[in-house]
Amino acid sequence: MAVEVQKGRAASVPRDARLAAGAALIDGEVVPIAEARIPITDTGFARSDLTYDVVAVWGGAFFRLDDHLARFERGCQRLRLDPGLDKQQIAAALADLVRRTGLRESYVDIICTRGVPAPGSRDPRTFRNRFYAYAIPYVWLLKWDERDTGMDAVIPQSVRRIPPASVDPTVKNFHWGDLTRGLYEAYDRGGRYPVLLDADGNITEGAGYNVFALVDGELLTPDAGALEGITRLTVMELARAHGIPVRETKIDEATFRRGSELFSSTTAGGVMAITSLDGQPIGDGTAGPVTRRLRDLYWEAHSDPRYSTPIDYGN
Amino acid sequence: MAVEVQKGRAASVPRDARLAAGAALIDGEVVPIAEARIPITDTGFARSDLTYDVVAVWGGAFFRLDDHLARFERGCQRLRLDPGLDKQQIAAALADLVRRTGLRESYVDIICTRGVPAPGSRDPRTFRNRFYAYAIPYVWLLKWDERDTGMDAVIPQSVRRIPPASVDPTVKNFHWGDLTRGLYEAYDRGGRYPVLLDADGNITEGAGYNVFALVDGELLTPDAGALEGITRLTVMELARAHGIPVRETKIDEATFRRGSELFSSTTAGGVMAITSLDGQPIGDGTAGPVTRRLRDLYWEAHSDPRYSTPIDYGN
């Protein structure tokens, strides 16, 4: 298996070597990621008026592509955005994009923005929406060789997660001001991974990841105020299929701190142990058994044909 | 004088006619606005991690340039962003940019973003921050010929302004998801100008404008949850200088609705009457006397040398 993967990698030199570091689809053209640019006047930038999604390619196949595309489509509908492509067309465009990079493990971002105003116009209903995509080498939120030493998490005191009454967190968005503030507070306090509270003091999510706590033998994850992550969903499905009780619920700070294991879930790294919180070790300070089990199950699920959409690299 | 201005205008064809519709300063180069692009991987886009400011040019001079640059610098400091230029350097760059467009009335945007991550990096402290600017023809949030018929405002019920505990509204930002939701609700309800409430039901601001209400002869404007607008500040200064009582305070929805006059303030249009709210006329449904007075004073202030920084167009 390892050898096969190696062979696959050797054969996967992209047709255009300039795309090997990543490529983007901009205005219908594929360009190297370092040259990929969007208009400064696109309200996707100037108003953060957009939705996006990220799907992983692992071992030359998309993981849960249909789920990501369905969420993206739902987000577009809620924001009244039209990417101009249906799910099948997006899937084909992404497969072509990844194929041209040659990447067997990739982080694939799709974005639909409101677009560029006509000169003098302020009415977003009149803008032509834009679809962008890019594929870069797979991103690890926590490096693989740190998987057992884990994430040093911090619960920021200086900032609260943007409430759903203001911005719907289930529509994936770039409103990261609160998460970035949390990130800086985490750094200032000697950690790297913020986990934000909402205004009521309940746990929400981190800067690009959902969170789980194993409390009294039951796996808990927030039921509101956070992205409905596909990795989060996968964890819940795998837990249920393997007899680990799991529940979506409010989790106050004290309950979260009581967790015998904590972990995060994200497309950018999968299931990742949180081994300390505000400098205090969780359990023995390394990835716990339930976390390891779910991590293993998560990676095994990548070879499940129900979840996997292989890419034809043509070689 | 009029002739001189005419002569000046006739002579002010930009050196590069391609810049006449607007120009941007990107990575140190001046380009036509239609070609101005930023990297798709800039976290200014991908995390809305930035601050910005907008300064107007009117009659060939910046209005309150120092105040805008001071606010921009303060925002950068709060977000730990370094535009790589001090205020004097930014002022010089902007004057050069506007001069090259030839625009005598311009909307000038300056932006500092966190920048592009090194491949695989997630630590914003390591990114090289980027400075962008662009100058386009002056933007009217409400067209000048609508100045007396005024703005048809709506108080959205489906969305609340992002709270300061999540994103600091006094650091000018592109987290407009709530404002855009408000804009769509306004359109759905037959208006065009949302005025958002906070979670406690107090008035905050609109989609790019502060608001004022004349209640029992006193001018009120929200004391929190909104941008500390330079036009708002100008209105308060002018009101005080001319004997109109003005106060920053909490304004609940009922109090706002009691206003005998309502108006908004923004760099993109100045003082603009709100003449209806949720379809109900305010006063007689046209711009009221205090609003007109302040509007006149606002435009007169543009010839006050304390506020004005003339641009040398070289002709």
Image: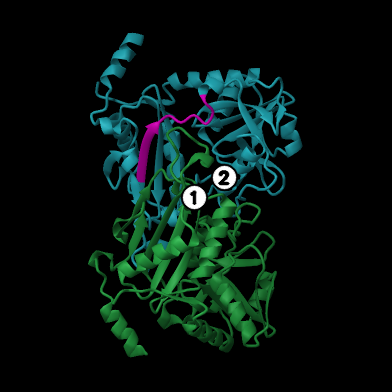
Chain colours: A green, B cyan
Chain designation of label 2? B
Q: Secondary structure at mark 1?
A: loop
Nearer the observer, B129 or B238: B129
Residue type, label 2? Thr
Can residue B228 be seen by looking at this rendering?
Answer: yes
- Determine the CA span between mark 2 and mark 1: 10 Å
Residue A201 on the magenta segment: no
Q: Is residue B55 left or right of residue A212?
A: left
At 39% across and 71% down in the image, what residue appears?
Answer: A106
Place of residue B115 in the rendered image (x, y in percent of width and height, measured from the top left): 37, 55
Q: Secondary structure at mark 2?
A: helix
Looking at the image, residue A54 lies above or below residue B163: below
Nearer the observer, B187 or A43: B187
Can residue B130 be seen by looking at this rendering?
Answer: no
Residue A173, labelled with which disc? none
Residue type, label 1? Ser
Q: Quick check: do tags 2 and 1 share a chain?
A: no
Place of residue A62 in the rendered image (x, y in percent of width and height, measured from the top left): 44, 73
Chain designation of label 1? A
Nearer the observer, B85 or A267: A267
In this picture, which residue range is highlighted in magenta? B132-143
Rendered image quadrant of residue B4 = top left
Looking at the image, residue B77 lies above or below residue B233: below
Place of residue A306 in the rendered image (x, y in percent of width and height, measured from the top left): 52, 79
The quadrant of the picture occupied by the N terminus of chain A is bottom left
Residue A48, labelled with which disc? 1
Judging by the rendered image, the residue that carries numbered circle 2 is B180
Place of residue A51 in the rendered image (x, y in percent of width and height, measured from the top left): 51, 56
Mark 2: give few (<14), some (14-19) or many (20+) Cα within 10 Å. many
The quadrant of the picture occupied by the C terminus of chain A is bottom left
Looking at the image, residue B217 lies above or below residue B47: above
